[in-house]
Image: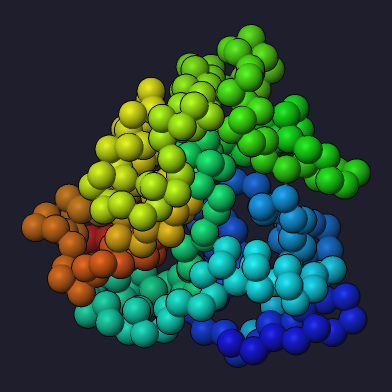
């Protein structure tokens, strides 16, 4: 990986296995939008990101080196050797998924945002998830530019009630958002602890939140805490396991199951039954 400051931008070159559009649009995060001039834009950790990628070059607009190193390198997991990890997947289906959608990386989001986002994602579709999260941010986040708002802190949400959240139109999820915020605010669940303890215990900690089952907990662990051994199972992944891995994931995925999952998930939801049967 090489990067340098050019004017007000950071220009990233020579990074393997990184497709910006795939990372922004493969179901991990819900705040990315494509601008009219082709940039991917989102607020990440209270920082506005405007990023474009073309011909192997990635440009981070209006970004200095400190911001790039402290925000964007961790967020896009740019220091992890994905090329080596993917080369170690000795499995025909994973290889098909990687060939079809190369460049997916696991996004390292702010843990509270990941917990809240995947509570909202339950029994929901992506456009509606994005709408709820946008309303949450514009209603309770801090305005940092004319059109950009931060993700509201759990301390702020903990002071609200269900009536305050009604305009989000999140339905039954409102009480789960509030329960999560209040438990974190009271210290009943510690984000720092969840990041460090064995994953089985971390999962149990998150499942203390009302409405958080194993799937939401695994999503939060993978996309918010960088626990790449987490393995969220939704409808698509359950289908993958039944169709392709009835005896479980292959040994080559041990310790990086979350990376394998993301490739398989995005691949499977974008191919039809006939293609799967031909591969099988």
Query: Where does the image place residue 224, in percent across and percent down from the top left?
Result: 48, 51
Question: Which quarter of the rendered picture does the C terminus lie within?
Answer: bottom left
Q: Is residue 88 above or below residue 235?
A: below
Whether residue 27 appears in this view of the structure is no
**Residue drawn at (30%, 42%) of the image:** 203
Left or right of 110, for residue 43: right
Q: How many marks?
A: 0
Whether residue 245 appears in this view of the structure is yes
**Residue drawn at (80%, 73%) of the image:** 64
Q: Residue furthest front?
A: 187
Query: Where does the image place residue 118, in percent across and percent down from the top left?
Result: 47, 38
Q: Quadrant of residue 142?
A: top right
Q: Residue furthest top?
A: 163
Question: Which quarter of the rendered picture does the N terminus lie within?
Answer: bottom right
For this rendering, which residue is in front, 82 or 104? 82
**Residue drawn at (58%, 12%) of the image:** 162
For this rendering, which residue is in front, 41 or 110? 110
Left or right of 163, for residue 117: left
For this rendering, which residue is in front, 179 or 184? 184
**Residue drawn at (74%, 55%) of the image:** 47
Query: Where does the image place residue 168, in percent across and percent down from the top left?
Result: 65, 22
For this rendering, which residue is in front, 244 or 165? 165
Query: Where does the image place residue 240, in percent across and percent down from the top left?
Result: 25, 54
Q: Is residue 145 above or below residue 163?
A: below
Q: Is residue 184 above or below residue 22?
A: above
**Which colour style is shown?**
rainbow
Left or right of 247, for residue 86: right
């Amino acid at each position: 990986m090489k990067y340098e400051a050019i004017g007000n931008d950071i220009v990233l070159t020579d990074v393997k296995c990184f497709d910006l559009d795939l990372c922004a649009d493969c179901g991990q995060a819900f705040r990315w939008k494509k601008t009219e001039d082709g940039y991917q834009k989102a607020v990440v950790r209270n920082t506005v990101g405007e990023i474009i990628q073309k011909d192997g070059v990635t440009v981070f607009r209006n970004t200095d080196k400190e911001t790039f190193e402290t925000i964007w390198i961790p967020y896009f997991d740019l220091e992890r050797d994905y090329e080596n990890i993917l080369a170690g997947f000795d499995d025909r289906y994973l290889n098909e998924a990687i060939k079809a959608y190369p460049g997916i990386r696991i996004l390292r989001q702010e843990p509270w945002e990941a917990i809240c986002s995947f509570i909202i994602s339950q029994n929901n579709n992506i456009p509606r998830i994005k709408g709820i999260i946008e309303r949450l941010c514009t209603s309770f986040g801090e305005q940092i530019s004319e059109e950009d708002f931060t993700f509201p802190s759990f301390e702020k949400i903990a002071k609200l009630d269900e009536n305050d959240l009604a305009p989000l139109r999140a339905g039954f999820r409102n009480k789960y958002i509030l329960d999560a915020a209040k438990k974190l605010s009271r210290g009943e669940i510690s984000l720092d602890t969840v990041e460090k303890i064995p994953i089985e215990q971390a999962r149990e900690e998150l499942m203390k939140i009302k409405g958080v089952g194993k799937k939401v907990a695994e999503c939060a662990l993978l996309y918010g805490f960088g626990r790449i051994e987490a393995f969220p199972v939704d409808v698509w992944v359950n289908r993958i396991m039944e169709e392709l891995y009835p005896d479980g994931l292959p040994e080559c995925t041990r310790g990086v199951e979350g990376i394998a999952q993301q490739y398989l998930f995005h691949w499977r939801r974008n191919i039809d039954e006939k293609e799967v049967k031909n591969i099988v």
